[in-house]
Amino acid sequence: MGNLVQKYIDIAKEKNPGEPEFLQTVEEVLTSIEPVLEAHPEYVEAGLVERLIEPERGIQFRVPWVDDNGKVQVNRGYRFEFNSALGPYKGGLRFAPSVYPGILKFLGFEQIFKNSLTGLPIGGGKGGADFDPNGKSDAEIMRFCQSFITELYRHIGPNTDVPAGDLGVGGREIGFMMGQYKRITNAYDGTWTGKGTANGGLAGRTEATGYGIVFFAREMLKHCGEDLKGKTVAVSGFGNVSWGTIQKLNQLGAKPITISGPDGYILDMDGITPGEKEDYLLELRNSGKNVCAPYADKFKGAKFFPGKKPWEVKADIYMPCATQNDIRLEDAKNMVANGCKYLCEGANMPTTNEAIAYLQENGVVVGPSKAANAGGVACSCLEMSQNAEHIMFSKEDVYKQLEGIMVNIHKEAADACEKYNLGYNLIAGANIAGFERVAEAMMLQGIV
Ligand SMILES: NC(=O)C1=CN([C@@H]2O[C@H](COP(=O)(O)OP(=O)(O)OC[C@H]3O[C@@H](n4cnc5c(N)ncnc54)[C@H](OP(=O)(O)O)[C@@H]3O)[C@@H](O)[C@H]2O)C=CC1
Ligand SMILES: O=C(O)CCC(=O)C(=O)O
């Protein structure tokens, strides 16, 4: 790594102590874009990287609410409006006990480049709260969401900041937040994405992230002269993204064999097939218990491995779709020992930097999350245009556009690494292609 990039990383470390997840993504992105900075001294002159690693705005607020026992609870809410060079801040809200600024800043920073890769006019942001929706009643979730929006409403809007879902935030939560936003502002507009279709939501948005990940994986394999058909796939998680991924894998003739939860993982060598098994994932998620073990009680032949991760299973492709840093160095070693050739990231930053380095050194092709899971936010942007135009797109329209966008993202990432003689390194390629578009826009807007 050159001195210049090291200087930026040192600045980030000094300004963001105790935020390892944010520093991890800053280091990954900046290391990749070094050749672009060398080719563009004007970016250095304009302090572009120093500005890029600092959120434009960070909001923290109190979220008081009353639980079903009449007890007052207090959570912390946040929104990091990271970069608006390409358009309104865009990115999800995460509700999970682990939420703190370091997590949201990592997600917001990633979102800048992901959104740029879609080629659509959206900036990057992320928010959420240290609230655990698991085990809460619908009434508690509603009261929490209403309180959260009673503060956040003043910072968002269809041309300012457009939130969506992420971990712990699905259609139900978006509905409650949109309802409260509308009540306060008296505006029925495109401030939210991931809404139910009855609320102006986009047909196909729920499965878009997972479908996009599989389209991206298909392009990776195609580039390497292979086909998804007949490939066994180890998937982690059992939420929205895993469900969409498993559906599309089945549709394209691959065989998903695992899911996982905080309790362990399920191995189903018969495949997690369409119909009863795919649908059961929804039941598991909706149980609010956040465990996957009951799958093995329901389906003969499936096995549950408590406290373990699916990365010890032999598979042709690995697709982490749960949460950050799910794959660590020891997991990467297992994968390589099992003959792994492809890793396609569904969750945001699911692999540690050490694990990525090991996988790449051992010839594994890695599809980075900011490219592979960009189909979700791309469809959110379609939802924004649907709302702005006061029309409704059909599911067929959405699927067609999504596939085109994912093919293009793969091509842009592959072309960018080739342009800088980096071989077929999609991590570098995605970071470079995402950065180039943001940098160009920032340069045109002056020092802001
Ligand atoms: N969601 C997205 O668009 C994107 C997510 N990611 C990343 O992927 C990883 C996993 O996130 P994610 O799967 O979203 O987390 P969750 O499983 O928590 O899903 C989020 C919400 O989606 C709802 N949900 C889950 N499955 C379904 C389904 N099959 N149909 C309808 N709604 C469903 C749930 O809402 P309810 O409780 O109401 O059922 C849940 O609260 C994280 O790293 C995240 O950052 C990355 C890109 C986009
Ligand atoms: O749809 C969106 O706006 C954001 C989705 C998201 O949170 C993500 O891409 O990580």
Image: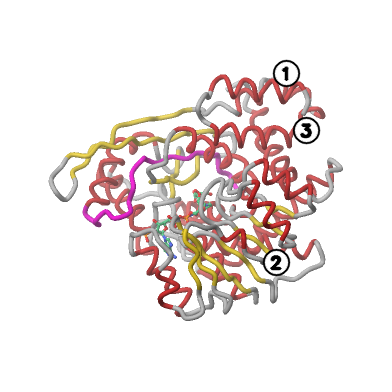
Q: Main secondary structure of the magenta part?
A: loop
Q: Nearer the viewer, residue 247 or 17?
A: 17
Q: CA distance from mark 3 to mark 2?
A: 34 Å
**Is label 2's Cβ within 8 Å of ligand 1?**
no
Foreground: 121 or 152? Answer: 152
Establish whether ligand 2 lies closer than 8 Å to the Cβ of label 3.
no
Inter-mark Cα distance, 2 to 1: 46 Å
Query: How many C-alpha atoms fall within 10 Å of the one at disc 2: few (<14), some, or many (≥20)?
Result: many
Between 391 and 182, the one lying in front of the other is 182
Task: Give how far across and how far down residue 360 sits, in percent.
Answer: 76, 48
Name the residue tied to disc 3. 36
Find the magenta span and give its range: 120-139
Residue type at mark 3: give it.
Val
Classify the position of ligand 1 by quadrant: top left, top right, bottom left or bottom right. bottom left
Residue 342 in which image quadrant: bottom right
Q: Is residue 273 magenta?
A: no
Q: Which mark is residue 45?
A: 1
What x and y, as percent, mark residue 59? 40, 30
Seen in the image, is 124 located left or right of residue 299? right
Residue 135 belongs to the span the image colors magenta: yes
Sequence-wise first label, 2 or 1:
1
Label 1 crowd bin: few (<14), some (14–19), many (20+), radius 10 Å: few
Residue visible at 15% across and 42% down? Answer: 71
Secondary element under disc 3, as helix, strand or loop, is: helix
**Element type at marker 1?**
helix
Residue 72: image x %, image y %? 18, 39
Mark carried by residue 316: 2
Looking at the image, is mark 1 or mark 3 earlier in the sequence?
3
The image shows residue 154 at horizontal and vertical percentages of 34, 34
Amino acid type shown at disc 1: Glu
Name the N-terminal-most of marks 3 and 2.
3
